[in-house]
Image: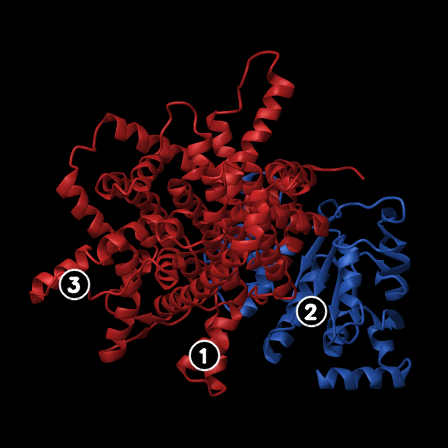
Amino acid sequence: MKLTFWEITPITLFVIFIAPVALVLYSLTGEYSDNWTHLYEFVLTGYIINTVYLVTGVSILVSIIGVGTAWLITNYNFSGKNIFEWALILPLAVPPYILAYTFTGLFDTFGTANNLIRDVFDLGREFTFFPKVRNIPGAIIVFSFTLYPYVYLVSRMAFINQSRTMLEAGRTLGLNKFETFYKLGVPMIRPAIIGGLMLVIMETISDFGAVDHFAISTFTTGIFRTWYGMYDIETAKQLASLLLIFAVTLILIERYSRRNASYSNAMSLYKPLFLTKLKGIPNTLAFLICFTPIFIGFLLPVMELLYWALNYKLDFFNEKFITTAWNTFYLALIAAFLCSILAVIINFSIRYKSNNYLKVMSSFLTVGYAVPGLILAIGVMQMLTYFDQSFISEFSNFILTGSVMGLVLAYVIKSYALSSSTIEAGYQRINSRVDDVARTLKTSGWALLAQVHLPLLKTSFLTSMLLVVSEVIKELPATLILRPFNFDTLAVYTYIYAAEERMYDAAAPSIAIVMVGLIPIIILTRMIRTSRPASRD
Amino acid sequence: MTALEIKDLNHYYVKGKNVLNDVNLELEEGEILSILGPSGCGKTTLLRIIAGLEKETGGSILMKDQIISDHFHTVLTENRDVGLVVQERALFPHLTIINNVMFGVSGSKTERHSTAMRLLKLFRVDRYAYNYPNEISSGEQQRVAIARAMAPNPKILLMDEPFGTLDQSLTNQLRVETRKILKDNNITAIIVSHDFDDALSMSDKVIVIEDGTVIQSGSAKDITHISREKSVKFSSIKANT
């Protein structure tokens, strides 16, 4: 069989993406140290239970917030709706670890919020109004209010593309508005919700900063402690391998659960939804439902960070800061563009070639998202070092290792799942008969992609860029390991200060991360609002 | 001249469960053929195989005496010179009507534009040339879909349940209009349908497929007389759908 570009590219990417992960997994075949025995006998069960609690709690809360707000925004007109429409994704700019830091700063016994209550009501130092947040429920809140935009974005896109006729059919069959939502609206976009939820779960299980700050023992804290505390990188990699197996299992379950799901508008009978105007109590309720996640996930941490920064550190805006912000921004844009274009090419290959092997390979490409950044960075570093030593050492010592290229590669492998799931969801809304017709009109391969698919995928492509940019700006561990010498990003600053509990010093770079993260979010959100090809479908 | 010849065509997705069995047919240039049959009988698969969207597992297909698909080689869809109209219309939602029709036409922009406008006028939808597909009715969308498929001047026009989602009066009107345009332009066409009326009012020839096998074939007039019991059986299926 003659291989074409559409088969060669997925195969090549499969090899590049899997190699670092395989290097980590390879550790399972090595020797198991005493540290492993200790972990296995005493702490592993705790890691698993805590991780499962976290994932379950976050999944439930994120689904409620993400789907609920997306439904309200898509179907109703209420006070502040035009602002909420884009403001609901603002928490994407706040990494969970930064919200965790501000939460403890606010709600710890002598945090800002408790101090305020004591001052206002003239209460003693022993009085504590807000409950402790350094626990699993606290972590669930932190993850949910920073990660729900993933579910919001995909649900909103799917709701926009829902035809009015289908929902009206439900109403004529006796469903009230709420029943239309949960019996018709939600089931019809179930695959999109599951796709968004998978991203949230992957983020949750691979986070280190927030759970470490809350002193919750999970797989990731275990991996880091094994490495930094016990200096046992092999055992750390073995633990990471278990987490990886868990993530792959989740991916397979998700794929299996929607194996027969088809949710394109099969007929070109799309009719845009009519918006219902809300008044009185429903209007206030809708306002509060949309305002609360923005307040907790964005306004509250930003206000706290500003308070810290303005009181303690005003001189952060210097040349070094601008260079660092520029480094962060251009790296994020390069990685986002590469991720999105690769996701388009891979998903197009699967569709164009109708090849099940390519589909299976594509599933494996998303696995980088579940690998903790630090472990992925080690895998990438080992791979690049091997490549340098095997092929380039004749000319120079190290070219790829410690280069921006290595960093971009790690970002792309880590963030590809975000792009892939978004582009895949976009593709599922393009009826396959469109391809059939285009082919009879002598349009195939690149022409089909450029002239038909890309214009229809514009919204998905921009969403994918948005998700990856905000992900890369927040990325810490991989950046720390793989950054070139004397090359900093904003996340590195924050990490160093926050690790030392110097929260006032961490405030300024944290704000910068949030602000830099906001720029592409605002630009891309506006573009998404004006593009919406689906509304013409 | 024979526009299309299909010899001993077989197809299966699971070995041993054929969806098409030894299909043979011949179509002269300018003729209109209807393929009739209940849902799942294999008629759409046959159309997709003719279009090159699926590869048959046995037999051969010739267009104008040239082999376009057999055991040894296959001409890709994009090189087969066929036009396709589907029930869902599948108009490109991001393009205006005129750009949809110009899409598959080659030549200079002026030539492409004039070809597209001529067809839009023929189908009486030229006033919507600069509208988007969602801005016109389903009947108008179907006219545009047929115009788009005809625009590159294909050797054969393939139509899969072209009027399946339209109401009866619109369907009747479009049948008459479409047949006239196809005949006036000497276009060879194959229409897949489960509707006897489509076949009788539009076609010169009809074949009836059941369970992947051609059970009747002949002129549209003959088909109502041959094998009456089979037709009755099929009509009852149609009435239930």
- Viewer-side residue, B1 vs A96: A96
Query: Are labels 2 and 1 assigned to the same chain?
Result: no
Does the CB distance between marks 3 and 2 fall below 8 Å? no
Q: In the image, is A110 to the left or to the right of B96?
A: left
Viewer-proximal residue, A84 or A474?
A474
A210 sits to left or right of B184: left
Instruction: Give the color of chain A as drawn.
Output: red
Residue B234 on image: x %, y %:
81, 82
Residue at which label 3 appears? A126
| Chain letter of the residue beneath label 3 in the structure image | A
The blue-tinted chain is B
The colour style of the image is by chain
Does residue A95 appear in this view? Answer: no
Disc 3 to disc 1: CB gap under 8 Å:
no
Res B59 → quadrant: bottom right
Q: Position of residue B168 (x, y in %)?
A: 62, 80
Q: Secondary structure at mark 2?
A: loop
**Residue linked to disc 2:** B161
Task: Identify the residue under disc 1.
Answer: A180
Callout 1: SS: helix
Q: Looking at the image, which residue is at 38% across and 47% down?
A: A209
Marks 3/2: CA distance? Answer: 78 Å
